[in-house]
Amino acid sequence: MIERINNLTKVIEKLTAKNNEEIEALRIKYLSKKGEITSLFNDFRDVPNEQKKEIGQKLNQLRNLAQEKIKSLKESFGNTSLTEQDLDLSRPCEPIEIGARHPLSLIRNEIVDIFSRLGFALAEGPEIEDDWHVFEALNFPAEHPARDMQDTFFIEKNPDVLLRTHTSSVQTRVMTTQKPPIRVICPGRVYRNEAISYRAHCFFHQIEGLYIDKNVSFADLKQALLYFTKEMFGEKTQIRLRPSYFPFTEPSAEMDISCDLCGGKGCAFCKHTGWVEIMGCGIVDPNVLEMCGIDSKIYSGYAFGFGVERIANLKYRVKDLRMFSENDVRFLQQFKSSH
Ligand code: DAH
C-alpha cells in the first residue's frame, strides 16, 4: 500500500497538461469515483489497524496533492471552461448600437448654441400655465380678438389654467423674476387646438428670445437675427423684415429668409416669392414691461419667437410635420451621424 502511495505521489508531482480538456481527463483518472486515488481509499478498509494512522495520513496528503495540482494546472489556463479554440483574442468586438438624437433636439441645441455665443442664457417655464403669463401680461386682454390667433387647450373647467400656446409665456416668467439686463433664449413645447395634418399639429416646439437693457433698439434686434440666420443657414442667406402685428411688441415684424432651394429666384417651396417666413419679432411693448414690473422709461427690449419644426423642415427638408412625433425608427435613424 505504502509503495503504491509513494509511486502515485511521484506521478502526481510530475503531472502536466496542454489544455483544460487534458486537465479534466487527469481529474477523472485520479480523483473521480473510479479514479486511482479513490480506489486506494477503498482499499484502505483492508489495512491492518496498527498501520491505519500512518497510511491514512499519507493517503490524505496524496489526495490533497492531487487536488492542488489539478487546481494549479487549471489556474495556469485562466481557470475558465473555454478551450483554446473558443478563445480568439484577435476577433473584433460586437458593435455597440448607440441611439441618435431626435432631429428637433439637434436643431434646438444648435439654435441655443448660436444664441449663447451672443450672450443669451437658457430659460425655461412650465407647459401648463395660467392665463396671466400666456396672455394677460403679454397685452392680450380678456375677450381681445388677438387671442383667436392661438386656439387654446384649457385644463378642465378652470379657464385660468391652460396649455401654453407659445413660449412667450417664458418671457413673462423671466421678466417677473429677474432684473435687467436680461438676455434669455427659451426653448419649449407648446400646444394649440389645431387639426393634425402634414403642416399643423396640436403640439410643436418654439424658441423664444428676449433681450432687455438700457437703449435696446430695433437695429440690435435686426443684427442679432442676421447673425443667427447666417450661422444657421449659411453666409449667403439674406433676411427681410415685414411689418406685422403682435400684441406684446410694438413695432412688430415678421422675418423671412431667402429661399435656399431656388437661391431666391422663386420655386414651389417658397411659393414663387423667393422668401420663406420663419419668425415673429419686435420691440417689447412698454405695457408689457410695466405689467412685469420693469420701468419702461429706463429699459427697452426686443423679443422674437419661432417654430423649431419649421427650421428643421428647412434644414432637413422634412415635408410632413407628423414625422417628428411618430417616432418611426427608419426616420429617426437618418439623423445618427449628425451628433
Ligand atoms: N408668440 C408668437 C407666436 O407664437 C411668436 C412671437 C412673435 C414671439 C413676436 C415673439 C415676438 O417674441 O416678438 O406666434
Image: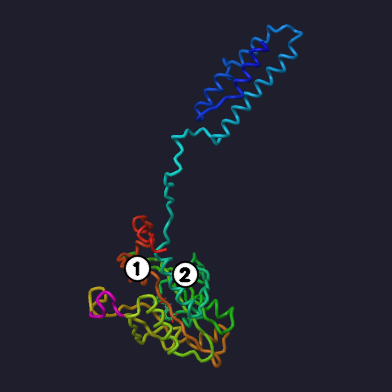
Q: In percent of the image, x 26 and y 76: which residue is there?
A: 270
Q: Is residue 152 left or right of residue 196?
A: right
User: Residue 315 location in percent, x, y?
Assistant: 34, 70
Q: Is residue 280 above or below residue 152?
A: below
Mark 1, residue position: 200
- Quarter in which the N terminus is drawn: top right
- What's the distance in space between the residues labelled 1 and 2, CA to CA? 17 Å
Mark 2, residue position: 188
Magenta portion: prevailing SS class? loop
Is residue 80 rendered magenta in the image? Answer: no
The dot on residue 115 is none
Circle 2 SS class:
strand
Give the mark toward the camera: 1 or 2.
Answer: 2
Q: In percent of the image, x 48 and y 80: which residue is there?
A: 118
User: Residue 23 location in percent, x, y?
Assistant: 54, 26
Q: In percent of the image, x 60 and y 31: which residue is there?
A: 72
| Image quadrant in which you'd find residue 109 | bottom left
Q: Amino acid at mark 2?
A: Gly
User: Residue 24 location in percent, x, y?
Assistant: 53, 25
Q: Is residue 66 above or below residue 137?
A: above
Q: Which residues are magenta?
A: 258-265
Q: Is residue 42 left or right of residue 154?
A: right
The picture quadrant for ligand 1 comes to: bottom left
| Image quadrant in which you'd find residue 165 | bottom left
Q: Nearer the viewer, residue 104 or 23?
A: 23
Q: Is residue 288 above or below residue 6?
A: below
- Quarter in which the C terminus is drawn: bottom left
Circle 1 SS class:
loop
